[in-house]
């Protein structure tokens, strides 16, 4: 895929010439030819500092938050984490738009909910994929789970393969960490489900409020057609009110 096509969906500042992109990469140690390398800051490292290593590993262009001192094409954007999801979705042909994707978030019950839904859909004769804590399953494949919600490149690659294998519905767990790091940017959801919010992950989130705010990010009428919410949970009611005020349609259970 040509860099100019990917740059078009990202916006930002396009610096340099054209490049043919054969793969996407975020790990400067991973050697792959003709990659578009997306520089990510935060976490344990800032890969803006690893540009030289990325070039030696096969990078021919970059998505970055600041102009790099290098004579290669680059797209400068405000937020590379959000850009990664969008560029991955575009690179793999926007697979989520060809599937009915159901996202499930909450402290407890995500895995149970995904498997219950998958079972119901299969009984209804649908071809279903599952993504979550116990791994990724679809068609005749079962892949191990490195993370509850895969990183955007892996996620969109898997969704694209699901399309090729005739999958119709995908039920996936969406963790608070994935929402915080914007891993599901570029994914269109047919429905999003909220189970509950209880104390957890305070080793990562400074407060319950910030943990709750991460969960809220899944429920935007721009990317989620229907919100299905636990009406017995205070946050579930708050999310529903905000979702409806923004023009979305919500359904409560309890």
Image (tube, helix red, strand yellow):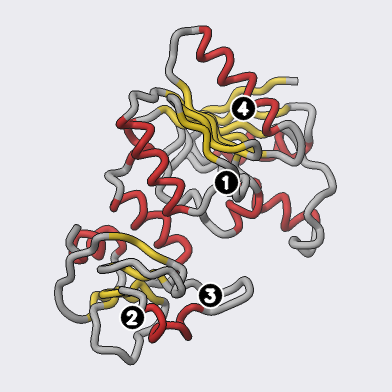
Q: Which residue is mark 4?
A: 114
Number of the front mark, 3 or 1: 1
In this view, the residue farthest toward the bottom is 69
Q: CA distance from mark 4 to mark 1?
A: 13 Å
Q: Which residue is mark 3?
A: 41
**Is tag 4's residue or tag 1's residue first in the polypeptide sequence?**
4
Task: Name the residue at 75% across, 41% down.
Answer: 107
Quadrant containing the N terminus is: bottom left
* Residue 244 seen: no
- Where residue 99 sits in the image (x, y, percent)? 38, 30
- Where residue 24 sits in the image (x, y, percent)? 35, 61
**Is tag 3's residue or tag 4's residue first in the polypeptide sequence?**
3
Q: Which residue is mark 2?
A: 55
Which label number is shown at residue 149? 1
Q: CA distance from mark 2 to mark 4?
A: 40 Å
- Where residue 58 sits in the image (x, y, percent)? 31, 74
- Where residue 72 sits in the image (x, y, percent)? 24, 82
């Amino acid at each position: 895929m040509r860099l100019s096509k990917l740059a078009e969906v990202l916006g930002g500042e396009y610096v340099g010439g054209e490049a043919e992109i054969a793969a996407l990469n975020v790990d400067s140690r991973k050697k792959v030819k003709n990659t578009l390398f997306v520089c990510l800051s935060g976490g344990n490292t800032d890969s803006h500092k690893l540009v030289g290593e990325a070039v030696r590993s096969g990078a021919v262009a970059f998505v970055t938050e600041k102009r790099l001192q290098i004579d290669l094409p680059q797209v400068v954007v405000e937020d590379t984490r959000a850009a990664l999801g969008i560029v991955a979705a575009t690179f793999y042909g926007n697979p989520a738009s060809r599937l009915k994707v159901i996202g499930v978030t909450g402290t407890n019950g995500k895995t149970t909910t995904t498997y219950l839904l998958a079972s119901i859909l299969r009984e209804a004769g649908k071809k279903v994929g599952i993504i979550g804590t116990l791994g990724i399953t679809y068609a005749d494949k079962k892949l191990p789970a490195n993370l509850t919600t895969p990183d955007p490149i892996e996620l969109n690659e898997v969704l694209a393969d699901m399309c090729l294998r005739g999958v119709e519905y995908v039920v996936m767990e969406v963790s608070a960490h994935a929402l915080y790091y914007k891993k599901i940017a570029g994914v269109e959801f047919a429905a999003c489900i909220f189970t509950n919010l209880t104390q957890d992950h305070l080793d990562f989130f400074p407060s319950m409020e910030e943990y709750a705010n991460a969960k809220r990010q899944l429920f935007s009428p721009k990317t989620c057609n229907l919100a299905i919410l636990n009406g017995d949970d205070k946050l579930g009611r708050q999310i529903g009110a905000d979702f409806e005020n923004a023009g979305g349609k919500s359904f409560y259970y309890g």
